Amino acid sequence: MKAIVLIGVNFVREQRWPILVMLLWVLLLAFLGLSTEAARQREDLLFVFKQVAVYVVAFSVFFGSSAIYNERRSRRILSVLSKAVARDRYLSGLVLGISFASAIYCFTLGLTGSWTLGQSGFAVSEVWFLMICLLAACILAGTVSLMFSTFLNPFFAAGATAALMGLPALATYTSGNSHWGLVIPVYALIAVVLKSSFDTASVGPWLPVVLALCQALVFWFVAAQIFSYIDIAVSVE
Amino acid sequence: MHPILFFEGVTKEYRRFIGGSFRALDSFSLEVQAGEIFGFLGPNGAGKTTAIHLAMGFMRPTAGRGSLLGKPFGHARTRQRVGFLPENIALYPRRAEQLVRFYGALNGMTFSQLQKRAAEVLQLLDLQHDAARSVSRFSRGMLQRVGLAQALINDPELLILDEPTSALDPVSRVRVRELLMESRAAGRTIFLSSHLLSEIELLCDRVAVLHHGKLVRLARTADLLQSNEKVEITATGVSAGLFTGATAENGLLRMIVPRDQQRATITRIWTAGGDVISVIPQRRSLEEVFLEVTADPHLNLAAGGR
């Protein structure tokens, strides 16, 4: 467990600049809250909040698809995996790192959102539930992209992740059956955030959150199986 | 007793996306015993690093099997007892001490163990004054020493070192050599891959030479360096003029003769009324052996070089 946490923290440390860039978007929301006539521009503020919120899912895919590639290309992976770290634990560390990075963003957005939306008269009790939905979506999206990145170039891994996450959404749209949304429920969780109106203090369904975490576990397992067969010392170029 | 490091018929092929495959190791077998410093030699592309990476579990063999400290290659917990320095080590940009502690913690060391041991290894490698500096500002030689420090942090039973002194200055090189000798004296096993033949010659108990993925020579260093072709004869009481190529100094006559002429030369010395002081087989340099072995591997295999 200690090694997993160390790898996770190390990942966040190595990705500190992209994380800071991510947080600039949250600063933009805070700036809007400070500088605009919030009461009059409620809808604009809500739009920016939702937009800024979904960016983190794209970032988690970016983190997941490039993590192993970067470590292999720099050859730093050799020093880590020459220690008593099994490959599945190494992947767990990376998933934890992606989760930490996403959690930092979600927490900062939750704080900023509560303040700015609250000032505009929205019922902000839903904000933290939405942040949990976002975090679950990030963990799942990050794990799926990490799985693809065990055998694909980051660019293709990101593309494959986007395609896989989009399939249930497409199935939901074409069949009209909303249950498709519970398969790889990234889209379903993003939809919860995008459709939230903040008019009532109610909290949405927890099922997609639980399913996202369970499915992340399945993808982690598949990733670990594939990664155990990969020659990590071979050049990734 | 289990060998510390064991390869049995290991073959590794790298598959190319287009154009078939490349065989980096071919039916490679080797046993490294506890407490020895084992030299691993070969020209570039001979398969040395591939063999090391297989042992560390970074890749899987195409055929064959092997073990590290009695466990199959890739067994994570076993690596707790191994120190590894890769060729051209890449490190995270951290303070040297912090980095060494990070690698130690990955091996399950406790905070108090790390505190004591990190200071020890940094001092051993003369890095104590740079412990608080980021390794991103270190020279290549200093990085290599940090690499050695991270390999030694867990006080390993087996050290696997891939070109450990290639970037070091002569002073550091001597220090590392002493360190390796101290490690052997403390009962550790060292598997050393290097192009610095003089170093291998000085340090290693046994040497293996790899060429085109095949083991072409495996012998005790002393045996390898001993020439079977020529002997040096030292005699007294005879004139140098009687023997072609002989040199005289302080009444002693020295000559190097082919082994098949040894008996005849000694007889001539006796016949001329001289005495034979010594007959010593000629010692070759490892460089000579290396060049000879890698020039025609098939010849050496046929001659029973293994």
Image (cartoon, rainbow, N blue to C red):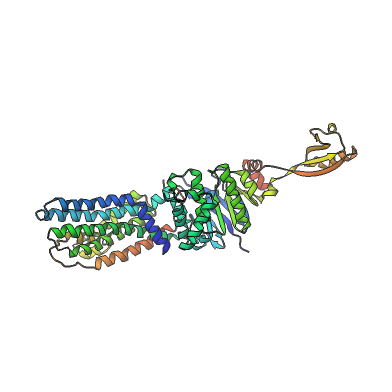
Q: For residue B187, what is the image quadrant? A: bottom right
Q: Is residue B281 above or below residue A214?
A: above
Tally of marks: 0
Position of B201 compared to B53: left or right? right
Position of B120 compared to A51: left or right? right
Residue B81: x %, y % from top left = 53, 60
Position of A8 compared to B248: left or right? left
Residue A157: x %, y % from top left = 34, 52
Residue at 23% x, 53% y is A26
In front of the other: B138 or A158? B138
Residue B261: x %, y % from top left = 81, 40
Q: Residue furthest top?
A: B241
Q: Residue furthest front?
A: B129
Q: Is residue B61 above or below residue B139?
A: below
Residue A4 shows in the view = yes
Residue A79: x %, y % from top left = 47, 53
Position of A47 compared to B141: left or right? left
Q: For residue A93, what is the image quadrant? A: bottom left
The quadrant in which the N terminus of chain B is found is bottom right
Residue B13 shows in the view = no
Residue at 29% x, 51% y is A20
